[in-house]
Image (cartoon, rainbow, N blue to C red):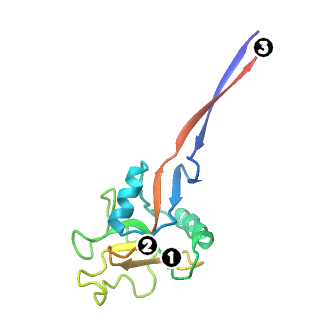
Amino acid sequence: LVSLSVFTYPRCEEGWEHNGGKCYLFSTNGSSWEKSRDECKQLGGDLEISSTFPLQGFLAERLRVKMERAEDKFWIGLTDSKNEGDWLWVDGSPLDRNWTFWRSGEPDNWKEKDPDGEDCVAMGETGKIIESWTDGSCKTEYKSICEKEEEVGLYTITCV
């Protein structure tokens, strides 16, 4: 009598963290928003899309651990670089204004450091879930959060 069972399980590559069917990588080096996005794409993903409160909570909790300094910021996949004030995720979907996590006074498109303004979004307010987004110059070198689909692994159990 031989019995064979095959099971699937979600998994993320080493260094990536699993949450809600996706894998997340928190970079340790700073890059511009565009370069950060390119780096995420090279790894098979893209900059992160915070579309739900539970996901935002997960990210905020992880940033508490990942932030080395209070001023650390992490690029996410939200920009209004095509049209000022029209915030789009990297997948082309518009920002749901019912689910935003802007810090007080943000977005402000401040132009003092960069005449192009602030067209890219970063997370990074220590310990805050609701008010953790800020717009920044896309040229600023921040860390980033990459996101990609989880992989499905297989394992087999054979009984003889």
| Residue at 33%, 56% in the rendered image | 91
Residue placed most toward the observer, 137 or 97:
137
Can residue 95 be seen? no
Q: Which residue is mark 2?
A: 142
Disc 1: CA contacts within 10 A as few (<14), some (14-19) or many (>=20): many
Residue 100 percent location from the top left of the image = 43, 73
Residue situated furthest bottom in the rendering: 112
Residue situated furthest left in the rendering: 83
Residue situated furthest top in the rendering: 1
Residue placed most toward the observer, 117 or 15:
15
Q: Circles 2 and 1: CB distance less than 8 Å?
A: yes
Measure the alpha-carbon separation of dots 1 and 3: 54 Å
Name which quarter of the figure residue 108 lies in: bottom left
Where 25 falls versus 62 (above or below)? above
Mark 3 element type: loop
How many marks are shown on the rendered structure?
A: 3
- Which sits earlier in the primary sequence, circle 2 or circle 1? 1
| Residue at 36%, 68% in the rendered image | 33
User: In the drawing, what numbered circle is on residue 124?
Assistant: 1
| Residue at 38%, 52% in the rendered image | 41
Q: Amino acid at mark 2?
A: Tyr
* Residue 102 placement, left or right of 66: left
Residue 44 percent location from the top left of the image = 42, 48
Q: Amino acid at mark 3?
A: Val
Measure the alpha-carbon separation of dots 2 and 1: 10 Å
Mark 2 element type: loop
Q: Which residue is mark 3?
A: 160
Disc 2: CA contacts within 10 A as few (<14), some (14-19) or many (>=20): many
* Residue 62 placement, left or right of 96: right
- Which sits earlier in the primary sequence, circle 1 or circle 3? 1
Residue placed most toward the observer, 133 or 37:
37
